[in-house]
Amino acid sequence: MIFFTINKKKKIIMIIGHKGASKIVPPGNTLKSFQKAIELRADYVEFDIHKSKDGNIVIMHDSNTLNVTGVNGTIKDMTLEELKRLDCGEGQKIPTLQELINIAKGKIGLQIEIKARGMEKQLISILKKEALIESSIISCFNHNRLLKIQKIEPTLKLAALEPLIVGREIRWEDRKRIVENAVKKNFYAIHPEYHLVNQKLIDHAHDNNLKVNAWTVNDIDIMKDFINMGIDGIITDDVEAVKTILNRKN
């Protein structure tokens, strides 16, 4: 992590590689892209998890394989062997969570977005076995899934993902509700879509001991604005750009 001077205070800014270092090494959510994020010394890799028919936790953004592999298939209805036959591009295969852990453990944090039901106990078991509870953040749009995880392992850092509702005016009441819902549920952070973020949201979150990590921020001017506002983390496809702004050498 980097100490970034802001308002004469030292501020930790987390660089979170969205699907790895997906701008530099596409396609994202592949071991090759994750490895590049590790080499660039991002603080976390962000990725999405699903569960295969035979109970393996695999990494892919969508529940269907069509957009990434060109083959129309639903992950929950396919075995790991079937999924591994597919090509994500550049010869990359759909990775398992364990395969990512094998290259990431001790080198980078895991920002895990849960995209499917029924994997909470299995995920926690893996993180405990690998001693990754402390260095992981779990996020989800379905906050009830986060509450299930909280009951099983209350020490895990949980983040409420918050979408932008297209066509709806963003009001302060909406931003305030995002913060207060996360506080009520005793979450670690909020992960709002970046259009939702402004100074008042960040200040209100910080007043309530909540971190704010915005997604997915690829515009340099917006990155700079958020850093000056005191944001805690930037989820980005462009890890190198954030490093450059923060003057981060390693």
Image (cartoon, rainbow, N blue to C red):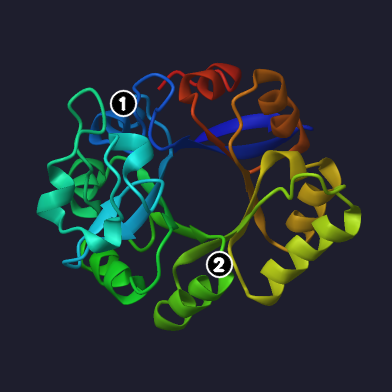
Task: In the rendered view, tell whether residue 154 sits above or below residue 73.
Answer: below
Determine which quarter of the picture holds residue 143. Answer: bottom right
Identify the residue shown where x is 14% and y is 45%.
Answer: 84
- Which of the labelled discs sits on residue 94, or is there none? none
Q: Look at the numbered disc 1 and give the secondary structure of its residue.
A: helix
Report the residue that reaches farthest toward the bottom.
151
**Picture coordinates of residue 77, whole percent (x, y):** 25, 62
Measuring from the top left, give residue 238's x and y in whole percent.
50, 24
User: Which residue has dot 2 on it?
Assistant: 142
Quarter of the image holding residue 31?
top left
Q: Residues within 10 Å of mark 2 (few under 14, many from 20)?
A: some
Determine if residue 127 is in view.
yes
Residue at far front of view: 72
Give the mark toward the camera: 1 or 2. Answer: 2
Residue in the image at 38% along x and 47% along y: 109
Is residue 131 in view from this perspective? no
Report the residue marked by disc 1: 36
At label 1, counting other C-alpha atoms closer than 10 Å, the crowd grade (few under 14, some 14-19, many 20 or more) is some
Residue closest to the eye, 227 or 20: 20
Q: Amino acid at mark 1?
A: Lys
Q: CA distance from mark 1 to mark 2?
A: 30 Å
Looking at the picture, tell me which residue is in the foreground, 17 or 132. Answer: 17
Position of residue 193 in the picture relative to residue 188 (left or right): right
Q: Amino acid at mark 2?
A: Asn
**In this picture, residue 51 sits left or right of residue 54:** right
Mark 2 secondary-structure assignment: loop
Instruction: Give the answer, above or below, for where 151 lies relative to 193.
Output: below
Question: Which residue is at a point 72% across and 33% down the rendered structure image?
Answer: 226
Whether pointer 1 and pointer 2 mark residues with C-beta atoms closer than 8 Å, the reply is no
Q: Position of residue 72 (x, y in %)?
A: 30, 45
- The image position of residue 240, as x and y in percent, is 47, 19
